[in-house]
Image: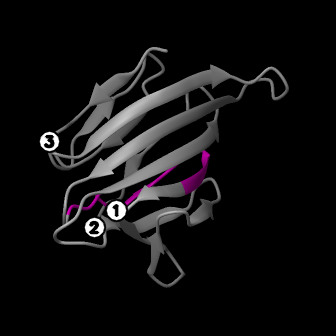
Amino acid sequence: MNVLRFCAAPLAALALMISASAFAHDPSEKVTVLQDEMLKNAPGKKALMIEVDYQPGQSSIAHKHDGTAMAYVLSGAIVSQVKGGPAKTYKAGEFWYEPAGSEHMVSKNASATQPAKLLVFMVLAPDEKVLIPLEH
């Protein structure tokens, strides 16, 4: 299995693959691509599985995804808020769904002292953006 690791300066997008999908994260946030596979039963779509490691107190920038996302907390606790909904804290073993195009206003480690880890599964077209920073 080929594992890629990426980090970027705050508010800067980092190209993940040749298709120009992008992430934007804090420099100490670690994003690992676990799988990136074209789907034979859904022509023109791919499945992407990533792992996001949050340091204590760390957060992602406000963003949206072109693709559908499902997130599962592997360890620690994550605060997540999609525009129009309340912020909710998810603990290890809990999960949520984000429809394509959802604006993810908050995604952060709920703890100021313990790290947290998130597994994200996405379905999107190869040319769609994984993460699009929101303008403030």
Residue located beneath label 2 in the image: 136
Spot occupied by residue 136 in the image (x, y as percentages of width and height): 28, 67
Badge 1, how many Cα within 10 Å: few under 14, some, many 20+? many
Residue located beneath label 3 in the image: 9
Marks 3 and 2 sit apart, C-alpha to C-alpha, by: 18 Å
Amino acid type at circle 2 is: His
Secondary structure beneath dot 3 equals loop
Residues at marks 1 and 2 touching, judged by CB atoms closer than 8 Å: yes
Secondary structure beneath dot 1 equals loop
- Asked if residue 39 lies in the magenta stretch, the reply is no
Q: Residue at x 16, y 69 (%)?
A: 113
* Residue 5, numbered circle: none
Residues at marks 3 and 2 touching, judged by CB atoms closer than 8 Å: no
Q: Is residue 132 above or below residue 115?
A: above
Q: Please identify the quarter of the rendering in which residue 128 is found.
A: top right
Q: Disc 3 or 1, which lies upstream in sequence?
A: 3
Q: Residue at x 20, y 55 (%)?
A: 55
* Residue 62, numbered circle: 1
Q: Residue at x 15, y 43 (%)?
A: 27
Marks 3 and 1 sit apart, C-alpha to C-alpha, by: 15 Å
Amino acid type at circle 3 is: Ala
Marks 1 and 2 sit apart, C-alpha to C-alpha, by: 9 Å
Spot occupied by residue 40 in the image (x, y as percentages of width and height): 80, 20
Residue range in magenta is: 58-71
Q: Which numbered mark, 3 or 2, is in the foreground of this view?
A: 3
Badge 3, how many Cα within 10 Å: few under 14, some, many 20+? few
